[in-house]
Amino acid sequence: MLKAAIYDPQFLSSAGIEAVLKTSNKPYSIKVLDPEKKLINQIANQDIDLLVLEYVGKNPVSSEVLKQVRKEFPLLKVLIISEDDDTIEIKRRIALGIHGFLTKKCSAEEIKMTINTISEGGKFYCQRVIDIMTNQEDVMSVELTDRELQIVRLIGKGQSSTEIADKLNLSIHTINSHRKRILKKLDFKSPAELIAYAITKMKND
């Protein structure tokens, strides 16, 4: 059975997330972590598959702490569900390679869908976060080639460059070159912004 941990100083949201986890497609054993204690110490020996995290509160989780979590536990999937609305702080955390970011205005169904997507190896961001990451008004007018759009859609499905190369019968070098050109065309600064944009394309197609 998969193991999940919840780190959220708000009791009601923590309880709500726990309830949603219990009804997801993937069965999880769930541990609610103590928000009064340091996050890194609590997950060190837990062998957790999924961490659901709120980083604001009495003992906020800084981007540096989250960076340490990603470095020390590279296989751990991280989903942030936060009330934060600070564009800079949201971008900082997504740039660390987290697997999902939702706001606390999301419905139980959206949370469940996100958990299922992450469990299957994908990434998921709510529309509010996608808008922040991609500045939709600026990028919607950018022209991508058919091949670039094809690659974007595969990225939106959570496929890696290696998987895309195999699917399209191209070299990994060619795929990475396409990704770099797409980033440049869209004026994105990080792969996380491209992933968010790709997810948006999947939703709109």
Image: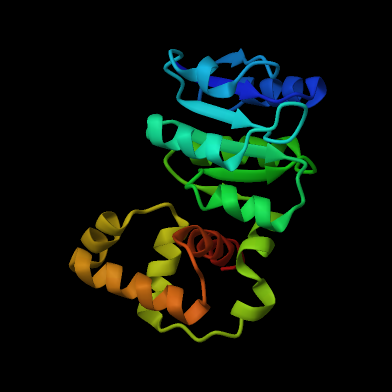
Q: Can residue 25 be seen in this view?
A: no
Name the quadrant of the C terminus: bottom right
Q: Does residue 201 appear to the left or right of 109 in the view shown?
A: left
Image coordinates of residue 147 in percent, x first then y, are 35, 78
**Which residue is nearer to you in this view: 160 or 26?**
160
Number of marks = 0
Nearer the observer, 142 or 188: 188
Residue 62 spot, x, y in % from top left: 62, 38
Relative to 104, is 66 on the left or the right? left
Residue 132 figure quarter = bottom right
Q: Is residue 82 left or right of residue 149?
A: right
Q: Which residue is drawn at 76% across and 31% down?
A: 57
Q: Is any atom of residue 71 visible in this view?
A: yes
Q: On screen, 166 above or below 51?
A: below
Which x, y percent locates residue 105?
80, 43
Q: Is residue 101 above or below residue 75?
A: below
Name the residue: 21% across, 59% down.
166
Q: Position of residue 193 (x, y in %)?
A: 53, 62
Using the image as rendered, state which of residue 26 and residue 162 is in the foreground.
Answer: 162
Report the residue at 55% width, 67% height from top: 201
- The residue depicted at 52 percent of the width and 23 percent of the height is 40
The colour scheme applied to this rendered structure is: rainbow
On-image quarter of the N terminus: top left
Q: In which quarter of the image is residue 176?
A: bottom left
